[in-house]
Image: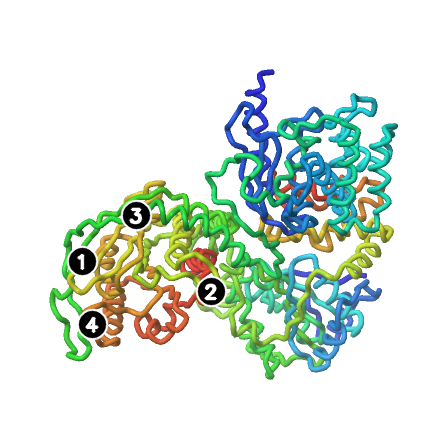
Amino acid sequence: MNPAAGAILKERSFADAERGLKAYLMALWRMHPVLRGVTAQAGPSAPRRVSFDGGYIRVAALHSETRADLIYWAALAHVAAHLIFTPGRSPIGALKPLQIALVSLIEDARVEALAIREYPGLHRLWAPFHAAPPGSAPTAEFLMARLSRALIDPAYRDDDPWVRKGRTMFFDHRLQWEQPAISRQIGGLLGNDLGQMRIQFNAKTYVVEPAYRDDNAGLWDWGDAPPQSADDSEVPIEAFRMVRQENDDPSPQRRSHDESASAAISAREQPIAEDAGVPVARYGEWDYALGRERPDWTTIMEFEAQRTPTVGLDRLLNEYSDVESRIQKLIRSARVGRPVRMRRQPEGERLDLDSCIRAAIDCRLGVSPDPRVYETSEMRDRDLAVLVLLDISESTKEFVKHTTTTVLSMERAATALLAQAMEGLGDPFAIHAFCSNGRGEVRYYRVKDFDQRYDAAAAERLAALRGGLSTRVGAALRHAHREIERRQSHRRLVLVITDGEPADVDVEDPKYLVEDARKAVQELAHAGIDVFCVGLDGGGDSYLTRIFGRRNAVQIDRIAALPEKLPALYFRLTA
Amino acid sequence: MSAGQCSGIVRSPALEDGIMQLEDYLITEEPYYRAIGGEVALFEAAYARRMPMMLKGPTGCGKTRFIEHMAWRLRRPLITVACHEDMTASDLVGRFLLDASGTVWHDGPLTLAVRHGAICYLDEIVEARQDTTVVIHPLTDDRRILPLEKRNETVRAHPDFQLVISYNPGYQSVLKDLKESTKQRFGAIEFRYPSTEVETEIVAHEAGIGGAVAEKLVKIGQRSRNLKGHGLDEGASTRMLIQAGRLIAEGVALASACEVALVLPITDDLDIREALSQTIAACA
């Protein structure tokens, strides 16, 4: 078979199994490492073994004669055993390449033995891959493969004195298997022996056997020179902390490491666009001190929405894949619609028992009965339009506590998930964003309009939103009012997501813009448009309540939970 | 052991026969229940004051078995109602039915318990609509009355009556949740998966298998619970482990028993199924 074709087949099988493999590691060890899939390289420089670097695992295209279907499971279980039982990178010291290979081999056997103690079935998973025959030629590679087999398979018989010596030493130290130092001790001695027997060993062509084991690069501190040029367009994550979770919330430290990579990428890729906005409307502003509206006081400038690749956003959304599946389920149950029982109908499929009884009683009394004795079921229909208004002012550039994610990134991820929910439910929706630079420049960005679909282009516009400037909520609300009032639906909702108090550069009095926003909300309510606010500011209770009303504002104190809570909130609001 | 279950109307003869009829709901044999903390003593104390109680926890953790055990222990009849979304207040409280001579009032299960002093257990109460559950409010404060407007009667609760509800707060509670005013009327006991030793004991006893096999099943169950929030809504419950154990007691191999009782029912996601199967293989 053409080896390239074989590589392609295996590649597909890792991608197919990837999700199951991740769940496997989570189930066995509550481990959530970063997996990088197989690369498309072919030829001699292609990596042939799985490699790990802390909690970052690079999977290669693996081939095996035996048990090919289980090789990725075996490989990842093996790396997991290292991540648990190998304490970190060891200094090379004075070890020669042959000794390094042997110390790694013993370490492989040691961590596997410890893993098997906890999960006996792993023995059945790994042992069949060790197929080195006992009578093979005494080259270093064959001897080492036979030694590996002898260490894992108690039924294997081998006459070679070196292999037997290695096996004896390993099992004599059975009680010290928890100590990593024994690998160096035993491996160093065995390496010495092979060297004295003048067995040839070519460190450059040596590949670890069997195929499921890793290349051991992650065990050693190589100093300046990394062992192989790996597919290093990625920023490797440095330190891995095992996720010991008491609850379902991902540990902020783990997320921070994942996020540092994506934050780095998104910072590199987003251009700083300084284009001019187009003034499209003027609105009045309420001055509470005067008790009057200042006519035509603010100007809305619509800015062309930029687009940027959604790499960073997708990466953040990956963290929330479970929220996504939950949303899908909620969509299905909300959308299929719950049949509502309509009682006391003049006609229908069934009799409404209570009405019938009332009618019978009335007959008895000699009163003419109410003929509405039927009941029927109706599918509940959804008829609402939503406009999501995002605050992208300067404060959203701040980092969420204990993470390297900005508030704006969280808002973005939450909005993306919400958009999925709304798209799935079929509710017409729009996503707009705003910030302001004085009353003459209230910037308004259209990520998605009502008549557009939420597609890749919309996601790119969402990803391109940049934080900056101030928060003149009232003006933005009035513009949103104009946008949504054209919608003909039973219910119309403006959903505002903001992280701070209304403020602007040309306004001194902190109450002024709060009161103006409150007035704008009242104007919307007067037109039959609901406004609801999701506040991300811990101390925001007072002004949020003042602007939106106590029942129409909610605080999310843990911003990291926003992507999870926002869609849930939406379902509840619109049930 | 039998605990009467009804989700509908019960024929209600004259009041004097009420006590006799509730004998159907008395539990005569001790239901096996292995305490995991002080919950038995806590519930006895709560019952002594007829305090309304809420049993919270994931499915399959022993809530129903617990209340059956307590009803047996306290020698009270237990009337269980399985709540669902289509349930109306009439289903709980009662309604008029027509017969040859005219209209006859039939007590619902809740009224029956209130009148004759049984423990009324509303299972999965969050499934019912909120306009149905408010019926219980006057019973759960100091008044302990149940107004029957259609009869123009106010039933005062029998001194032995107690209301117990079960509540499984899952993500589904985004759409359906108890009102705050309802929740605050109850004391709550939380049920979680027991510790390894206790769960092994329970599984071994209920499935009729040896300790070593039970230990393996419990280990598998615990690993599956690691996937809660990472592909599964809930891991395998104790009940599922018992089912797997029962199959093993009938001679089925462990891997197949787990496949049938744990993996296949819990998820349709092929990737997660494969991960679970591999996990089971590793534990076995």
- Chain where mark 1 sits: A
Badge 1 density bin: few <14, some 14–19, many ≥20, Cα 10 Å: many
The first of marks 2 and 1 along the sequence is 1
Residue tagged by mark 3?
A448
What is the chain letter for disc 3? A
Work out which residue is located at the far bottom of the displayed protein and give it. Answer: B142
Q: CA distance from mark 2 to mark 3?
A: 27 Å
Where B148 sits versus A414, above or below?
Answer: below
Q: Secondary structure at mark 4?
A: loop
Report the chain holding disc 2. Answer: A
The span from disc 3 to disc 1 (Cα, nearest Å) is: 18 Å
Label whose residue precedes the other's in the sequence (4 or 2): 4
Identify residue type, mark 3. Answer: Lys
The Cα atoms of the two marked residues, 4 and 1, are separated by 17 Å
Secondary structure found at label 3: strand
In the image, which disc is placed on residue A507?
A: 4
Question: Is A212 above or below relative to A460?
Answer: above
